[in-house]
Amino acid sequence: NPALCEKAGKRLVAHAHQAGLLPSSPTVSAFISMGTEISTLPLLAALLEAQRKILVPRLGKGREVLWSTLPDLDSIQDMGAKRPKEPSNQALSPESLHAAGVVFVPALAVDHDGNRLGRGAAWYDEALAFRSEHALTVAICWPWEFSETAVPTQPHDVHMDAVLTPEAFTLLAS
């Protein structure tokens, strides 16, 4: 339901504001939601309003992960059914993620130890290898995807520092 996803996205922004995430870093990485994910458009709009530089992922060739600066919401283009939307501007190198102080990451499940389950294939985990060691990694998911049950892990999985749902922001123990 797109209206439900949009409403949840607005509630994400309220919790991100309360947690001080929006003004915390001049450069932030976020993603453009797709399908049944919570809409990140309200978050992206709030980050633009806060005059943050926003890096969003782009699919390169094969498993390559590139980034683009999001200048405004109007630059977002539909790339086809199974691809995330992307800005129409130039692609940046994988290393550009290192500039982000906060990295918002999509999640299908996250446990209270910060283990995250994504869509599979470790695509996002590989991209996160280029983040700064000081960056705060924040998983975005629905409240029922923030699990008391341990999420299965693999050696390449990147630990999340926090979880943001439409219900709350939770900083996880390291």
Image (cartoon, helix red, strand yellow):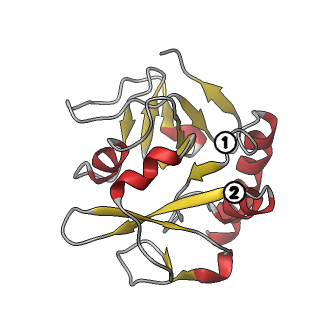
- Gap in angstroms between the C-alphas marked 2 and 1: 14 Å
**Disc 2 vs disc 1: which is toward the camera?**
1
Disc ID at residue 43: 2
Q: Is residue 67 above or below residue 109?
A: below
Helix, strand, or loop for circle 2? helix
Q: Earlier in the sequence, mark 2 or mark 1?
A: 1
Nearest the camera: 96 or 11?
96
Nearest the camera: 29 or 174?
29
Residue 11 drawn at (x, y percent) = 76, 50
Q: Are marks 2 and 1 in contact (CB under 8 Å)?
A: no
Q: Is residue 128 above or below residue 148?
A: below
Residue 138 drawn at (x, y percent) = 54, 38
Identity of the residue drawn at 52% across and 35% down: 135
Q: Is residue 17 left or right of residue 140?
A: right
Looking at the picture, which amino acid does disc 1 mark? Ser
**Would you call the spot at circle 2 few (<14 residues within 10 Å), some (14-19), or many (20 or more)?**
many
Looking at the picture, which amino acid does disc 2 mark? Leu
Identity of the residue drawn at 73% across and 64% down: 45
Instruction: Read off the residue under disc 1.
Output: 25
**Would you call the spot at circle 1 few (<14 residues within 10 Å), some (14-19), or many (20 or more)?**
some
